[in-house]
């Protein structure tokens, strides 16, 4: 928070604890601290958050990027670097665009379609694509998962809602972040199941599909994936 309002890196804040605040900085920090005390979360207050060494613009319309999602991105980057002819990807449920845009920034000739059912989320993703100067290699589409997209794609990435509906009322995250990005239906894998079904005709032979899921859902999702892609290798990491 201090780094944001002082417009300094965190290392500078730690190295200069004696630095005085001007009136505007002081007032902004006090107001932000008050919002924190009333339950708002820091990324929405300051309007941005770090992901994979990049700084993404955020609004309450999108999920806050999390470190565990960086593992999915790292896997995608490594695979793309090993498969030099695989250069067409889609980020389903893109939210802030952090997955797709990070892939594009790390793979110079990659083309990525960023998709979300929320128009407000796509506006945030577009802002981030403009910020990182990748508009020429990104496209945007508002749709429910892969509906209306012909593909096919070399890489399908998705961090979809995976929290069971019954748990949303008792989890603090449901009060702070968009319900649409969290509610995974009765079992928590309703949306993931639909994407797996749609992906059968959208994923190129030999392509890769990367999904973020909750740790307890591994067996159920693996079973679904094998049903839709019976000849493919399915791994839970």
Image: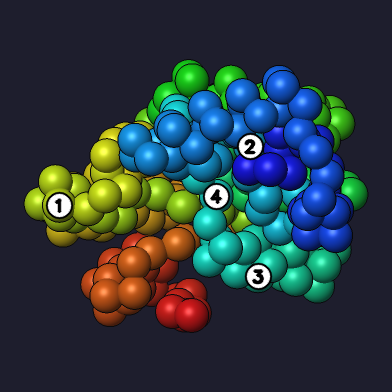
Secondary-structure class at tag 4: loop
Give the CA distance from mark 4 to mark 3: 16 Å
Near mark 4 (Cα within 10 A), the count class, few <14, some 14-19 or many ≥20, is many
Mark seen at residue 121: none
| Quarter of the rendering occupied by the N terminus | top right
Which of marks 1 and 3 precedes in the sequence?
A: 3
Image quarter for residue 152?
Answer: top right
Which of marks 2 and 3 precedes in the sequence?
A: 2
List the residue tagged with mark 1: 170
Mark seen at residue 65: 4
Q: Position of residue 225 (x, y in %)?
A: 36, 68
Q: Position of residue 172 (x, y in %)?
A: 26, 50
Which of marks 3 and 4 precedes in the sequence?
A: 4
Which of marks 4 and 1 precedes in the sequence?
A: 4
List the residue tagged with mark 2: 48
Which of marks 1 and 2 precedes in the sequence?
A: 2
């Amino acid at each position: 928070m201090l780094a944001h309002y002082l417009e300094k890196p965190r290392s500078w804040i730690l190295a200069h604890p004696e630095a005085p605040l001007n009136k505007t900085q002081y007032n902004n920090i006090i107001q932000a601290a008050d919002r924190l005390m009333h339950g708002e979360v820091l990324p929405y207050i300051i309007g941005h958050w770090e992901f994979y060494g990049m700084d993404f613009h955020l609004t309450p319309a999108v999920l806050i990027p999390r470190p565990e999602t960086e593992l999915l991105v790292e896997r995608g980057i490594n695979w793309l670097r090993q498969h030099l002819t695989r250069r067409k990807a889609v980020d389903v449920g893109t939210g802030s665009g952090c997955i797709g845009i990070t892939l594009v920034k790390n793979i110079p000739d990659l083309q990525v379609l960023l998709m979300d059912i929320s128009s407000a989320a796509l506006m945030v993703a577009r802002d981030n694509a403009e910020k990182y100067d990748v508009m020429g290699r990104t496209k945007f589409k508002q749709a429910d998962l892969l509906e209306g997209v012909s593909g096919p794609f070399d890489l399908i990435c998705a961090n979809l809602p995976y929290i069971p509906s019954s748990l949303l009322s008792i989890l603090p995250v449901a009060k702070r972040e968009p319900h649409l990005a969290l509610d995974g239906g009765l079992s928590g894998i309703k949306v993931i199941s639909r994407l797996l079904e749609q992906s059968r005709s959208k994923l190129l032979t030999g392509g890769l599909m990367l999904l973020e899921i909750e740790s307890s859902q591994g067996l159920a999702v693996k079973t679904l994936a094998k049903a839709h892609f019976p000849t493919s290798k399915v791994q839970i990491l």
